[in-house]
Every structure is written in structure tokens, then in C-alpha cells.
């Protein structure tokens, strides 16, 4: 994976103390049935930005971390901004207005999505991607990604184009995955009820 862009996080000791006393700001996810997940999102206009790009991307990152995800797009949180974030730990990149330059190879493997809890589906995606995008300052980059990072980027780019991963699954595979998820949801509900304190 190529070098990641870091966010503007330089703070004073006093600022750091204040921040630890307050909860990190995060977004709520829209339900999997929300129509925004099936919309093609418009270009993010850096000449007349609808939001502060750095702050918005940072909140997407904090939300993704809070949910233990590897990637998150704006429309998963109900926003029509053409941006997603991908990464792990403290190493995330914000991709504004991403465009595929080149794809190579194919890999078939299990995939999940924060918008579809407990739903793992095997999906075929390209093994490598060259992508052009803008960072939160509007500067253009072209980078090559492989493996899991390429998969995450392609998954999130689909979100920006109104495509959810369930539409890429074979019908029988999707049906089996949905049955498995329903069983898991029932188990989670039972555990929650058993642990409830009245």
C-alpha cells in the first residue's frame, strides 16, 4: 500500500487535555434501506465547498474507527459528498472525487459492509487499482493499490456510485448469506435479552 495522507491533527497539550474530556465526534450510519445508498453522488466542489473538507474527512475517519471498519463513504452517513476514507489504526486516506485509471486481475473473497451488519458475502473484485483522487486540500494524486486496500477502495467507490455490494453477489450466495445473518441477528438479540438488567 502506498504512503497514506495524514490529517491535520497538531494540537497543543491543553487542547489534547480538553479533547480527552470530550467524546470524539462521529456520524450515525443510515439504515441499509435508505435510498441515499443507491444514489450517484455529485463531485465535491473545492471552489465552493459544501463543508470543511478536512473536518468532514476527519469525522468520517473517527466514525470508521469507532465502528471498527476499514472504509466508509459519505452517503453511508447520509451525506451527498463524493468522498470516502480507507485505512486502519491511525493510517487513513480521504479520497475526494476518486476515478479509476486502471484495474488489473481478479480476486474472489469474503467482503462485509458497515451498512449491512453481520452480512459477509463472497464478491469478485479487481486485485489491483490505479486511482486518481483529490485529498482534503483539493490536490490531485494518482496512486496504485493492491490486495485488501484495493478491495476496500473499490467497495467504497461503488458506494459513491450508488452500488451496494449485495448487487454484486450471485443470487444463491446472497440468499445463503442473508439466512446466516438472520440466524446471527437472532443470537445477538437473545444474548442482549439474557444480559439485560431490569
Image (spheres, helix red, strand yellow):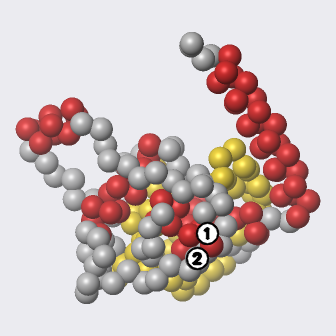
Q: Is residue 142 above or below residue 68?
A: below
Find residue 126 and report its image quarter.
Answer: bottom right
Towards the viewer: 196 or 83: 196
**Outermost residue, top side:** 198
Find residue 20 and report its image quarter.
Answer: top left
Q: Looking at the image, can residue 132 be seen?
A: no
Describe the element under mark 1 as helix, strand or loop: helix
- The residue under the point 73% across, 50% down is 120
Mark 1 residue crowding within 10 angstroms, few (<14) / some (14–19) / many (20+): few
- The residue under the point 63% across, 73% down is 38
x, y percentage for residue 145? 53, 69
Describe the element under mark 2 as helix, strand or loop: loop
Q: Looking at the image, can residue 101 be seen?
A: yes
- The residue under the point 33% across, 84% down is 45
x, y percentage for residue 169? 80, 65
Discs 1, 2 touching: Cβ within 8 Å: yes
* Residue on which disc 1 sits: 35
Mark 2 residue crowding within 10 angstroms, few (<14) / some (14–19) / many (20+): some
x, y percentage for residue 161? 58, 78
- Label 1 – label 2 distance at C-alpha: 7 Å
Amino acid at each position: 500500500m502506498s504512503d497514506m495522507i495524514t490529517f491535520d491533527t497538531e494540537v497543543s497539550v491543553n487542547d489534547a487535555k480538553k479533547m480527552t474530556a470530550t467524546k470524539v465526534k462521529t456520524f450515525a450510519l443510515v439504515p441499509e434501506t435508505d435510498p441515499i445508498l443507491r444514489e450517484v453522488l455529485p463531485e465535491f466542489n473545492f471552489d465552493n465547498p459544501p463543508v470543511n473538507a478536512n473536518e468532514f474527512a476527519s469525522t468520517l475517519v473517527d466514525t470508521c474507527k469507532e465502528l471498527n471498519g476499514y472504509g466508509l463513504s459519505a452517503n453511508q452517513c447520509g451525506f451527498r459528498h463524493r468522498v470516502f476514507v480507507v485505512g486502519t489504526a491511525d493510517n487513513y486516506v480521504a479520497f475526494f472525487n476518486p476515478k479509476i485509471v486502471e484495474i488489473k486481475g481478479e480476486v474472489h473473497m469474503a467482503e462485509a459492509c458497515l451498512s449491512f451488519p453481520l452480512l459477509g458475502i463472497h464478491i469478485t473484485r479487481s486485485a489491483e487499482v490505479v486511482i486518481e483522487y483529490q485529498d482534503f486540500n483539493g490536490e490531485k494524486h494518482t496512486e496504485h493499490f493492491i490486495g485488501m486496500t484495493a478491495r476496500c477502495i473499490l467497495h467504497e467507490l461503488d458506494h459513491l456510485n450508488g452500488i451496494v455490494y449485495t448487487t454484486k453477489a450471485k443470487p444463491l450466495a446472497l440468499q445463503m448469506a442473508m439466512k446466516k445473518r438472520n440466524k446471527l441477528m437472532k443470537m445477538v438479540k437473545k444474548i442482549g435479552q439474557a444480559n439485560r438488567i431490569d
